[in-house]
Image: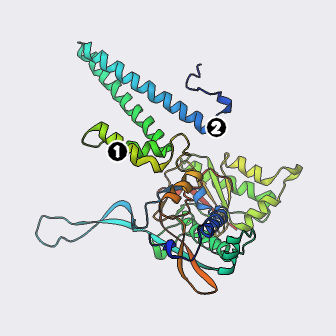
Amino acid sequence: MNHLLRDIAPLSDGNWALLDDEARERLHGPLAARRLVDFAGPHGWEHSATNLGRTEELAPPDGEGVEGLRRRVLPLVELRADFAIARAELADDDRGSVDADLEPLDEAAVRIATCENIAVFHGWADAGIVGIAEASPFKPEPLGDSAEQDYPRSVARAVESVRAAGIGGPYGLALGPGEYTRVIETAEHGGYPLFDHLGKVLGGGPIVWAPGVEGAVVVSLRGGDFLFESGQDLAIGYDHHDAEAVALYLQESFSFVVATPEAAAPLSR
Amino acid sequence: MGFDQYHEPPEELPAETRTFARLCASLEEESQAIGWYQQRLAVEPDAEARAIMEDAQGEEFKHFSMDLEALLRRTPRWRAIAEGVLFQSGDIVENGEAAEAASEDVGSGEEAPPEGSAAANVAMARAGDGSLGIGSLRGEDR
């Protein structure tokens, strides 16, 4: 048994399978960053820091002619989203019900995925994580008011900024939920879907629904520019229970490093 | 252009299996070239020619190693066995037998999904740390 304490939870194997499958399904959509950045790991719960390959000066304890240096690392951070499932629902699942109420899990999945996206795209200052959009040297390109008329031009400008910096494609586009909805609802003159037009502007890269993203971000997918390092990948753990409910949580540990700031360009609302 | 690396109709094979077969064919060709250069070097007296052949053989060492690493990354059981054999001291055959036995829980190489795929991540998670095995979602549809 590991730190997730799954073996002592009052859940049957079937209950765990139900919750794990539901979590995978609900996380798959909103985990936008993982569709666009490099993913390393998982390296395990014990993995605590990412090697930055950098040092800082450190006074040696004694002696002249001796130089001290300290390695700089980026500590991994943990995210945890608590939720509780009614024991009656779990008992009904064991009886073969097909409509278990797992809404608390669904909501926790969106919360933790949104936090992950925000950390990757907009940063997490207290964690020492610089986000893709804030690291970019390019001034945010206004998306414009009209999805039909302005979005293709704005995205093309953002792509051109990255390309002009010598960063090859294909390029991906992370869109905040509001912008994503506007894109999929919009057809240009002649009925050509805006979604398809943007796909061509990006050179075939994906357009990603990204909860937590403000505006949009164009990202090169050539690789090596953005590194998400996973310690413990997303998992469900057990906290406690009473007669009514089982308290569980979704948890992960990770770090994120921008290696090439000019490999992305933000777009503002 | 030949398609000898396929033993089944290519149109019936999934794309990742065709790529796997191409990598296997490349691995075979690189090892053949290594053997040929080894033989040429054994008989060639001209120093300049030998230097060129040694340089070329070094290239084949690199190509072989890259092909092998790519295949191991896509085949968890093969990788598990290789980890027990490669760069290990002691008896090679004994190490191989032990690595093969220890790898049985990893799953069949032929049936194993490509590393990094959703199926591979889930399989690894169920075997190990209790995570959901989501991993990277690059290349997956929303």
Give the structural element (helix, strand or loop) at label 1.
Answer: helix
Q: Position of residue B85 (x, y in %)?
A: 34, 41
Q: Is residue A240 above or below residue A266?
A: below
N-term mark: 2 or 1: 2
Q: To which chain does the residue with label 2 belong?
A: B
Q: Is residue A61 above or below residue A163?
A: below
Quarter of image, res B21 = top right
Q: Nearer the viewer, residue A224 or A26?
A: A26
Left or right side of B64 for A64: left
The residue located at (55%, 25%) in the rendering is: B5
* Residue to which mark 1 is pinned: B98
Q: Position of residue B111 (x, y in %)?
A: 56, 43
The residue located at (39%, 45%) in the rendering is: B101
Mark whose residue sits in front, 2 or 1: 1
* Residue to which mark 2 is pinned: B14
Left or right side of A127 for A175: right
Residue type at mark 1 is Ala
Q: Nearer the viewer, residue A95 or A37?
A: A95
Q: Is residue A242 above or below residue B109?
A: below
Give the structural element (helix, strand or loop) at label 2.
Answer: loop
Give the farthest residue toward the right. A190
Residue A193 visible in this rendered orientation of the protein: yes
